[in-house]
Image (cartoon, rainbow, N blue to C red):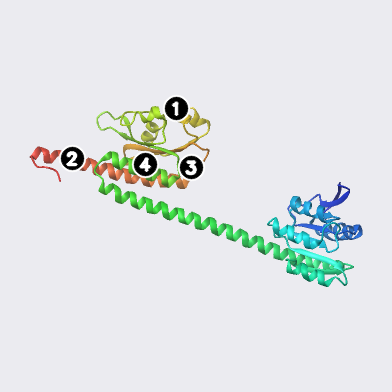
Amino acid sequence: MAHARLTEGNGLPTMATSLNSGAEKILIADEDPDVLDSLARQTLLPMGYQVATAADGPTAIQRIITFHPDVVIASLTLPRLTAKDVLVTLRAQGLEAPVIVTAPVGMESMALRAFRLGARDYLSKPLREAEVVSSVERALVEARLRREREALASRLAETNQELEQRVKQLTLLHGIGRAITSLDQMDQVAGRLLEGARFATEADMGWLMLREDDSGQLVLRAQHGLPTPIVARLGQAWDDGLSPSVLVSGEGMRLSGDGLRRLAIGQACQTALLTPIRTRGEGLGVIAVANRRPRDFTQHDQALLEAVADYASIALINARLFRSLEARLATDGMPAT
C-alpha cells in the first residue's frame, strides 16, 4: 500500500505518495477539505496512485504544471477559478490529461459547457467512491492509449527517418560506384570518395591517405575541414598518428576521449573513425572521418566507411591498370585512348 505525505504550500494542502514513484498521477482540485481527504487519503492513495490536491483554481493550475497529472478531478465550484478555466489552461499548456468534473446536483448546464471544452466525465456530489474509482480507471485507460499512440507515432517517425537516411546512404554508395568508373584522375576519385564517406557518416571532417608505390609513405590525397597547417601538406607525406597503424593492422579504428586527445589530430576533433583501403591483403591507403563535436561513430558508420573503402580499392586498382596500359602503349608507340 502507498503511504501519504502531507505538506503545506501557501496554506493549501497537497498530498502525494511517498512510494511507487512510477505510479500514475491524479490531481484532485476541490474547495471542500473533506472531499480532498476522502478521495486522496482514503480512496486513491491506497490504490497505489500518486495523488496531489489543490483547494482553489490557481493552486490547481500550479499543480498541473509541476505535477503533470495523468488525470484531473476538478470541482465546477472551485474558488477564484472554475473547472472550465482549468480545462482552458490545460489546452493552452498543450497538456492532454483527461478531466473529470464534479458539481452539486442542479449544475448540469455548467457540466455540459465543461464537456464542450473537453471534459471526459461528470460526477454529481456527494461523490460515491465506486463511481470515482470507475471514472478514474476509464480516464486512465484513455490516457494510456493516448501515450501508446504517441509512443508508436514517435517510433514510426524515427523508423521512417532512419529508413530515409539508409536509402540516401545506399543511393550515395551506388553513386560512388558509378562515379569512380567514369573518373581517370586520382585526385578527382579521392575527392569523390571522401565526400561520400563524410556524407554517409555525417562527419564534420575527413581525409584520405594513399601509400606511394615507390617510397611506401602515406600521402595526403584529399581532405575536408582539416586545420590549415595540415591542408598545406596536401599531396605530401603526412603522419596523422593513426593511419600507419590502421594500414599495418588491416583493421578499422574508432577513437574518442583521452586516447584521441594524445594524438596531434586529436587537437582538431573529438571523435575519429578510420578504415584501411586494401586489396588481396595489400594495404593501399586509409580513409578517415572525424567530428569536431562530441558525437561518437557507430558500428553502422564503420560499415558504411568500409563500403566506401571497398570502392576506393577498386578505383585504385583500376588506376593502376590504366597506368600500366598507358606505359605499355607508350612503349609500343601507340597513344592511350
What label does residue 194 carry, if any? Answer: 4
Element type where label 2 sits in the image: helix
Instruction: Work out whether mark 2 precedes mark 1 in sequence or the reverse, and give the earlier one.
Output: 1
Pointers 4 and 2 in contact (C-beta within 8 Å): no
The residue wearing badge 1 is: 264
Q: At label 3, which amino acid type do we have?
A: Phe
* Residue drawn at (62%, 60%) of the image: 150
The residues bearing labels 4 and 1 have C-alpha atoms spaced at a distance of 21 Å
Q: Quadrant of the N terminus?
A: bottom right
- The vertical placement of 148 against 275, above or below, is below
Q: Are the residues flagged by discs 4 and 1 in contact, CB closer than 8 Å?
A: no
Of the residues under marks 2 and 3, which one precedes in the sequence?
A: 3
Residue for badge 3: 297
Q: Is residue 226 above or below residue 15?
A: above
Secondary structure under the numbered disc 1 in the rendered image: helix
> How far from the left and from the top, in percent, is residue 69?
75, 56
Front disc: 2 or 1: 1
Type of amino acid under label 1: Ala
**Quadrant of residue 38 in the image?**
bottom right
In the image: residue 255, left or right of residue 195:
right
Sooner in the amino-acid sequence: mark 1 or mark 3: 1
